[in-house]
């Protein structure tokens, strides 16, 4: 795991310098390049936590499971003595010690992270099938992921890989909103989603699962084993207790990875 000691701004604003054009299509809501100056218009706090360097199962070269709900993700982290990351922890690890909108800088770059691939047509009935013989070939066709950590520059200076791009990730949210009461989605995936560090998606409920959606785990550090924070007046944030959840219908779904047999 990566240990992160970060001064986090609860409300950070970036100004877009140039809008993106992806696959020849101008993007209204996606920025190609940001101005390097940001404006912190919220409170600041020190966040200290441990975060998996790679998406679950935290192994370089592995493929994180997809088609997992936030309930499944929470349970799978709990199995390892960990928890889902809070959205502000995830943002801190993505932005780095000198905050940037992308983990690698201010300019969107598909050579650094797995982003901006053309989308593939979705067949909703096949994608929602409970028959592995139907679902698994559909997931193989849709998958455009790369192995965890295989894009060496898709990391901030905290050493956490693939936060923007490859697969979106479940996180605990600090404020309910939209369809979400305790979990939301960060990071964007391999198509032309926003794929920047700050935004959090609250469109889908916690029971939702999807083919480019996975997660990674965090845990609280042993603060007695690390240097105390400097006496700079910045308050140390204590994460709230994780929500108490159980797998849906009492059944833990471990998700799908490429090459999985339908039998």
Image (cartoon, helix red, strand yellow):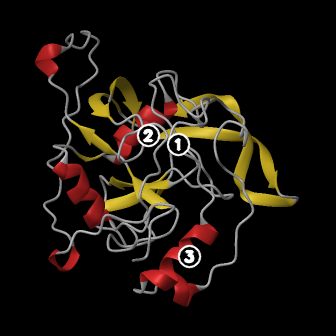
The correct choice, above or below, for 167 with respect to 10 in the image is below
Determine the residue positioned at 29% across, 12% down. 232
In screen coordinates, is 49 left or right of 134? left
* Disc nearer the start of the sequence (3/2): 2
Expressed as whole percent of the image width and height from the top left, the position of residue 83 reads: 22, 47
The residue indicated by pointer 3 is: 137
The residue indicated by pointer 2 is: 91
Q: Nearer the viewer, residue 50 or 203?
A: 50
* Disc nearer the start of the sequence (2/1): 2
The correct choice, above or below, for 40 with respect to 223 in the image is below
Q: Quadrant of residue 154?
A: top right
Q: Within 10 Å of the Cα at label 2, are there few (<14), some (14-19), or many (20+) other Cα atoms?
A: many
In screen coordinates, is 241 left or right of 162? left
Q: Nearer the viewer, residue 96 or 64?
A: 64
The residue indicated by pointer 1 is: 197
Q: Nearer the viewer, residue 227 or 219?
A: 219
Q: Nearer the viewer, mark 3 or mark 1?
A: 3
Determine the residue positioned at 38% across, 60% down. 184
State whether residue 182 appears in this view: no
Mark 2–mark 1 contact, CB under 8 Å? yes
The correct choice, above or below, for 212 with respect to 147 in the image is below
Q: CA distance from mark 2 to mark 1?
A: 6 Å
Dot 3 falls on a residue whose secondary structure is helix
Q: Quadrant of residue 39?
A: top right
């Amino acid at each position: 795991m990566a240990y992160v000691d970060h001064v986090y701004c609860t409300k950070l604003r970036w100004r877009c310098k140039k809008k993106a054009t992806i696959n020849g299509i101008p993007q209204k809501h996606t920025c190609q390049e940001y101005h390097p100056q940001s404006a912190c218009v919220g409170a600041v706090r020190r966040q200290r936590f441990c975060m998996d360097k790679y998406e679950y199962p935290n192994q370089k070269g592995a493929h994180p499971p997809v088609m997992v709900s936030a309930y499944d993700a929470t349970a799978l982290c709990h199995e390892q003595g960990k928890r889902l990351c809070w959205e502000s922890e995830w943002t801190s690890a993505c932005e780095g010690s000198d905050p940037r909108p992308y983990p690698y800088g201010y300019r969107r770059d598909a050579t650094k992270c797995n982003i901006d691939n053309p989308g593939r047509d979705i067949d909703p009935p096949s994608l929602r099938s409970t028959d592995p013989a139907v679902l698994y070939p559909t997931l193989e066709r849709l998958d455009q992921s790369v192995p965890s950590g295989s894009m060496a520059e898709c990391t901030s200076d905290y050493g956490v890989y693939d936060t923007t791009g490859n697969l979106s990730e479940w996180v605990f949210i600090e404020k309910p909103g939209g369809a979400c009461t305790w979990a939301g989605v960060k990071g964007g995936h391999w198509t032309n989603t926003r794929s920047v560090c700050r935004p959090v998606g609250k469109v889908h409920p916690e029971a939702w699962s999807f083919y480019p959606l996975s997660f990674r785990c965090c845990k609280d550090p042993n603060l007695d084993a690390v240097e105390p924070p400097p006496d700079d007046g910045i308050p140390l944030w204590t994460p709230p207790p994780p929500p108490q959840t159980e797998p849906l219908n009492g059944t833990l779904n471990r998700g799908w990875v490429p090459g999985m047999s339908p039998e």
